[in-house]
Amino acid sequence: MANLITLLRFLLLFLLVAMAYWASPQWQLLNAPLLVLIIGLDAVDGWVARRRGETSVFGSVFDIAVDRVVENVLWIVLSNLGLIPIWVAIVFIVRGLIVDSIRYAAMGQGKAVFDTVRGPLARMLVAGRWMRGGYGALKATTFAWVLLLQPWPQLFPQTWAQWSAYLQAVSSILVLATVGMCLVRGLPVIVEFVVGHKVFAVRPHLSTGSR
């Protein structure tokens, strides 16, 4: 059941994308509530998995993969539609690929997802319940706000002409705050991996010959 809910989120994402591109402005007003539903189902599938004892490695990986697909597709779509700058999508995609690669490597060694960080500050930023919840809420708010404003120039031209500068300023603040929290939560994972594995350490050259 939990995996079916995750699959439903995946399918609803593409309904949302289709509406963002091809629906009439009136129908596009439903995009923000649809986005909230997609994100809300993320909590539902986890609850169902725990309640029904359906937790598994596949379910965990599938859930994480769909989370990333939802997030990255939305950033790309919003940038392609001109609703956010393209560099924002690039930051989220690059950060997500690097951090997820480190986490999947740790999972392959039998470690939990958040065992990739050990320092107390890093664990608070990356694994802390409030930080994780706050980050998710901020992303949801940003996506919903930007999608909500998309049809306004066509539906409410006079209101948009009068208030667009203020409404777009709110969008910019939300986007920048989300980017900032994305980097704050991603950098500890990368730094601890680089330091822990001595990625850039200079190793002495071992010579096999003699002089």
Image (spheres, rainbow, N blue to C red):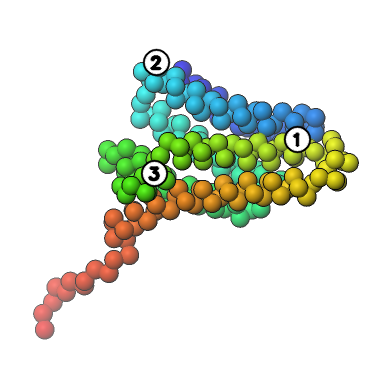
Q: Nearer the viewer, residue 207 or 179?
A: 179
Report the residue that reaches farthest toward the left.
Answer: 210
As drawn, is 54 to the left or to the right of 145? left
Which label sits on residue 124? Answer: 3
Q: Amino acid at mark 2?
A: Arg
Q: Residue at x 58, y 28 (%)?
A: 38
| Up/down of 131 relative to 45, above or below | below
Q: For residue 141, which quarter of the picture?
A: top right
Residue under label 1, please give it: 22
C-alpha distance separating marks 1 and 2:
39 Å
Q: Residue at x 32, y 65 (%)?
A: 200
Q: Kindly report which numbered mark, 1 or 2, lies closer to the viewer in this rendering.
A: 2
Q: Are marks 3 and 1 in contact (CB under 8 Å)?
A: no
Residue 197 locus on image (x, y percent)? 28, 56
C-alpha distance separating marks 3 and 1:
42 Å
Q: Determine whether the residue tagged by mark 3 lies in a helix, strand or loop.
A: helix
Q: Determine whether the residue tagged by mark 1 lies in a helix, strand or loop.
A: helix
N-term mark: 1 or 2: 1
N-term mark: 3 or 2: 2
Circle 2: is it few (<14), some (14-19), or many (20+) Cα within 10 Å? few
N-term mark: 3 or 1: 1
| Up/down of 170 relative to 31, above or below | below
Residue under label 2, please give it: 52
Report the residue that reaches farthest toward the top.
Answer: 52
Residue 113 locus on image (x, y percent)? 36, 39
As drawn, is 197 to the left or to the right of 127? left
Q: Amino acid at mark 3?
A: Met
